[in-house]
Image: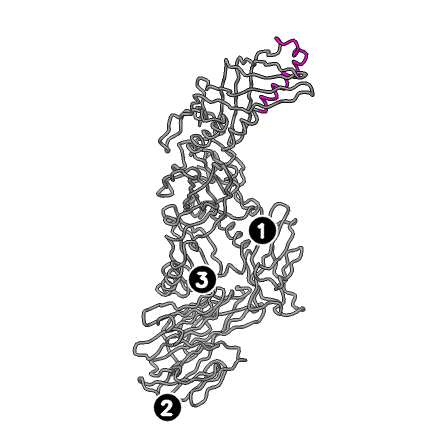
Amino acid sequence: MSDAFSTSEVLDLLKMGPSTFGWDVIVCYNRDVVNRIVFMDYINRYNIDSYIGDIEDVITISENEEWRYLYDYKLDAPILSFQDSAIETSRANLTMLVQGGVEISVRKDDGAAARRITSISYVDALAGPKLVAKLDLQTVSGDVSGAGEIYLDLSKGVDFEMLTSDDGVKNSRGGEFFKELFDRLPLQKKKYALSTYESISNQFVAPEKFVLRVHKARDARVRNSPRYGDGSVIQFVAMKGRPQGTLPARDADMPYLIPDGYSATILVGQHYLLRTLVKEGLRRFSNSSLAQVSFDNEQNLQAPVGNCKLDFVAIRAENPDIPISPSLRMRMDVSDFPFFGEPGWSMASVTYGKDGADDPIVFSMLASGFQHAATITLNGREHYVPIDFSTSSFTCRILNGKIEEHRLDPKFLEPFSNYPELRPYTIRLTAALVAFYRNLDESRSTALLSPLREIDRFRDACLLFRDAGSRFRVKESYLPLDLVMFGNAAPASEAFDVVPSEKIVSARADGTDTRFLQFNTVPERSDVNWSVRVVPGFDGMEAGSIDALGRYAPPLAAHISGLQTRVIVTAGTRDASSSALVFVVKGDIRANPLISVASLGGEKHALWIGAVDAAQIEWSKESDTGGQVVAGGLIDPVSGEEVGTHHYISGPSASPPGAFSIDRIVFRNKATGSECVLHMLVVHRQLGGEVLVDERVALPPDKIKLKFLKEGEEEEVVEWKIELGGGVINSDGIYTLDPSSDMSYALISGRSGVSGYIIIPIPLIDFGKTMSLYGY
């Protein structure tokens, strides 16, 4: 078999039998294309209300031992992505980046009098962890509300993981915390909106339920295959009031439906097409309930429909008054226009798979031996004229869901020869009569095809994408058994991509700062118009500017309130567009955690270093213990995801030995020269002392009283020292913070025969009170 996977190969597979597993419609999209379009949809829908916050709570990592405190925590809007999986393991992720807030780790050692802070992170868009909601598509179902909202029901089949370290237990505990928050939400909040389907009156093709699966492409596991890693997202759709089908248990149980050169396929089940849509078309064609249609196979959805026979249908038409001239009028009297199926009349199944995939559905109906009547008024005098038909036939060929040809051909005897007064008008009267039946042909053919045309509306109203430009465009369609349409999803988006699609840039310092970010299109286009706009909700801030070559100049830092703003850059042509999301931050490098506590002996800690250009990060360190910094995060043992961008490994021993030492790590953005500093407090041995906040003493908001405990008893004489951070501390242990300090914490040590320390977040937070509020 050749490397190519052609439409003819797909059609050969579809000729073997119905392939929708009893579902009315199957829609398949290339997985990479889906993820790209969903991300574009995320960008286009993005606004400041997309943030989830402000969260203030405590996560229990280990009961009575370890906690993580979240303060003013903000999560970005969730981004949906379908994972590289198979039908039997189908899954998707909703990923939420932490965009702001304070995260403080707290621990209580055995025998200790109080909790102590072990790390502090001040998170923003440059450096922060992420929350992943993992969707089990075997459990998560899709629904369409009465208002036409298409959504995923997340009330079941969702697990969370907070990726903050290489400790799977810690990550799972963080996930459990957010899972509990999620479970407490009302049901309406547990819906993930995908798109909408406009409800109209007398709608026949109306989706009601769907399930999603991920399907691997043929040869997707073969490394040298051109389709290595490829896959599709499959939507199995049941229409309103109709039963759901079965599902394939594994990839091999269904053909891969997207041939090379296309990104999407729609498969309309033969049973739904003929036994529902065509039957409804015949009912509308006849304008009565007298249509009698039968099929060889009425029960087994896994087998072809077989022959479809028409026993009787009668057109019921209006009786129009037809003006011919000021003195001549004709009124038709057509109560019934009976048609009978010709012997052997059939639809589609006679020729399915015999002469090629493009065999049409053929309607062929015959009537004979009946009479209509016309009342003709000439100069005020009425003439009742019977119109005798020798035969009348109706033929309609439907090829791939479209009318190829149709003809209502009435054969009536000369009706006016026995009326001398009407003979001079025979040509005009005959032309009016023929025109009447031609109009009847048009109206009835339209009625016959109207249910099938709703497929076009369903196809255009994509169930996975909200954007009106993200639609399915048919390139080829065939009728091997099921009706199959090959095409591309969201051709406006597929025309080109803007790169980079998401970027963090620093604001310009002043008017002399000429930095810009270059945007391009892939493939390259010379006819695009570039524009930039502020994300809704960040109104009042400048967006910056972009020139005709795609060079984006960010706004001045002075024109951004807070730490950041967001803008959307768009490249557009007359018939296509693509966008990118840009974070504009006031700094160009950020690192977290700002301070952490480690022990000697190779202990690992994940670090998040974010810069405008991550490839330009370099670092240096000062360590008395041989501590190391390594590029690349730590691997979470549960999800396999990388946590952090770098990681720290504590040294094996201290030289000289002492109670503790402080490793200083400087990260530098080579492109700009900006630096940020992290500190690792490396504990060499059991310290023996504890430093606590003395809550018995009331002080102004900028002061706290510290006390020192040795073996559980408070010491009177203590040697206090500010190891890191601003402010001053007196001999009584009263610490006064320095509001002008650029450090957001203070590390203070105490010594009274033994040593101890405390890490204090700035601004000051009453942790004893805060923890007690949450029952800890």
Judged from this view, the residue extending furthest toward the right is 326
- Amino acid type at circle 1 is Ser
- Say which element carries label 1: strand
Please check the rendered image and state whether residue 435 is part of the magenta-colored stretch, yes or no. Answer: yes
Number of residues whose C-alpha sits closer than 10 Å to that of mark 3, classed few (under 14), some (14–19) or many (20 or more): some
Q: Quadrant of residue 680?
A: bottom left
Q: Which residue in the structure is indicated by mark 2?
A: 716
Q: Nearer the viewer, mark 2 or mark 1?
A: 2
Q: Which residue in the structure is indicated by mark 3?
A: 130
- Say which element carries label 2: loop
Number of residues whose C-alpha sits closer than 10 Å to that of mark 2, classed few (under 14), some (14–19) or many (20 or more): few
Q: Quadrant of residue 514?
A: bottom right
- Say which element carries label 3: strand
Instruction: Name the residue nearer the viewer: 335 or 107.
Output: 335
Q: Which residue in the structure is indicated by mark 1?
A: 578
- Rounded to the nearest whole Å, what is the CA distance between mark 3 and mark 1? 26 Å
Q: How is the image coloured?
A: one colour
Number of residues whose C-alpha sits closer than 10 Å to that of mark 1, classed few (under 14), some (14–19) or many (20 or more): many
- Amino acid type at circle 2 is Glu
Please check the rendered image and state whether residue 10 is part of the magenta-colored stretch, yes or no. Answer: no
- Rounded to the nearest whole Å, what is the CA distance between mark 2 and mark 1? 68 Å
Please identify the quadrant where the C terminus is shown: bottom left
Image: 318 above or below 660: above
Percent x, y for residue 763? 48, 77
Q: Which residues are magenta?
A: 417-439
Image: 423 above or below 513: above
| Marked residue nearer the N-terminal end (3 or 2) | 3
Percent x, y for residue 26? 44, 40
- Rounded to the nearest whole Å, what is the CA distance between mark 3 and mark 2? 45 Å
